[in-house]
Image (spheres, rainbow, N blue to C red):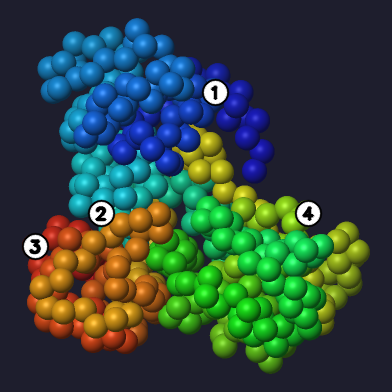
Amino acid sequence: MDYTNLINDKSGKKSKVGIIGATKGYGYTLLAQIPHVKHMELRVICSRHTDECVDVLTEIGYDTKKIVVCADKAEIDKAANDAILVVSDYKLVMECGITAMVECTGNTAVSSDAALLALNKKINVYMVSKETDSVCGPLLNKVAADNGVVYSLVNGDQPRNLLDLYSWAMLLGLDVVCAGKASEYDFVWDRENGDITYTDGSGRVENMPEMLDCWYYEGTETLEKRHKLLEKYEEVISADLCEMNLVSNVTGLVPSKPFLNYPIAKISELANIFIPKEDGGILDKTGVVDVFYNLRGKDEASFCGGEFVVVRCENEKMWEILKGKGHVMSRNDKYCCIYYPYHYMGMETPVSILLGDFMQIGTHAECRQVSVLAGVANKDIPKGSALKVEGHHHAIDGLIPELLERKAVGNLAPFYLLNGMTLLRDVKEGNPVTLEDVDLTSLKTYEYFAEGLKL
């Protein structure tokens, strides 16, 4: 998309942004970028720790004379129109004259309530909290459509970037066999000394000269060899499956398998891997979402947790021309991998906000609960155990996430509604957590999930 007309907009309109969950990670990167974006200004940020908000704004370089901490609506009403407000109650964000509410807390109860408050006040919502969209996305998209406003996932996170790539492919009439992303960290091999590094920040380095035996892709047996070498580093990551859940619900693509495939692969190999088994790939079916671990040499660029689609090559001569341009094609010339090797977190998110506020692009009224993220016990978990989402990967100790087609879900409990729940009975290793194992009836988010299932 060419953004020149948007950049040159002469209407005088501005996106007035309010951010909930603003001081760390994603919120921080967005705060750092907003001052550089034309037609956009920060109006309010919200955190339980208002002093942290002030410190972050000051660190980034916002005008400290304009920062005003407000305890209630009366103080908001007294503040100058160009003040940057700081509040501790997320409900006050909607009272600040914003056009765009960005939700970054990761808390399903807070973010779903905040989103509904904003949408019903005709304020556009930009959802960073993927946990919330995984259980409430269908309902929130419907409420937005009913109110004539925008509910949107955001560029900078993989689901929206992948949806943009997928919709581009759909616009062109391409047949998408698989859509997916790289997991967050790479396996980096130094051929000179044989060291393999897993870039998860742990500093883990292992000497593995035997990687040479499976460095060049010869077929799915190569993936098996890599798996045997690196199995202890591999895991099914909650955040990855959640992100593919979001893409599934908008596109109608289904999970490749409950735990996805996670092959260890180079970018140049993807068109040989994410294709049907009968053509030498790993897929039992097509029209799926999936994830891979990026394998690269020490001197090669990362995929950066980016996104890809694998499409069928239906005109032999056309794709022969494109293959000559260096595109990633399968050995049998029947498939091509098209990809974005990036996601830039909050630095990219202003694109989504401006597209929503200025062009009403975002809402997917067709969003349905196509797939559901659930949890399977990886150890015996006794009755009375408290379940908690925590850590960088938004995981629950004792559970492995699985992503299932809706028709296979039955009475399984949605993964991110388990946060804060206490088990009502023992759950044995290998068994999923069901609606009989926890009481979700008191959760508004469960009501929203149930309403979404009816759409």
- Of 451 and 30, nearer the camera is 30
Kindly state the secondary structure of the residue where label 3 is placed. Answer: loop
Question: At which x and y percent is residue 314?
Answer: 77, 76
Query: Can see residue 169?
Result: no
Q: Which residue is mark 4?
A: 299
Give me the residue at 78% from left, 75% from top: 212
Separation (CA) of disc 4 from disc 3: 53 Å
Separation (CA) of disc 1 from disc 3: 43 Å
**Left or right, residue 259 beside residue 231:** left
Res. 104 image quadrant: top left
Type of the residue with mark 3: Ser
Q: Which residue is mark 3?
A: 442
Give me the residue at 40% from left, 18% from top: 58
Separation (CA) of disc 2 from disc 1: 30 Å
Discs 2/4, front? 4
Is the C-beta separation of discs 1 and 3 under 8 Å? no
Q: Earlier in the sequence, mark 4 or mark 3?
A: 4
Question: At which x and y percent is residue 194?
Answer: 75, 67
Please state, as top left, top right, bottom left or bottom right, where the C terminus lies in the image: bottom left
Is the C-beta separation of discs 4 and 3 under 8 Å? no
Q: Which residue is mark 2?
A: 108
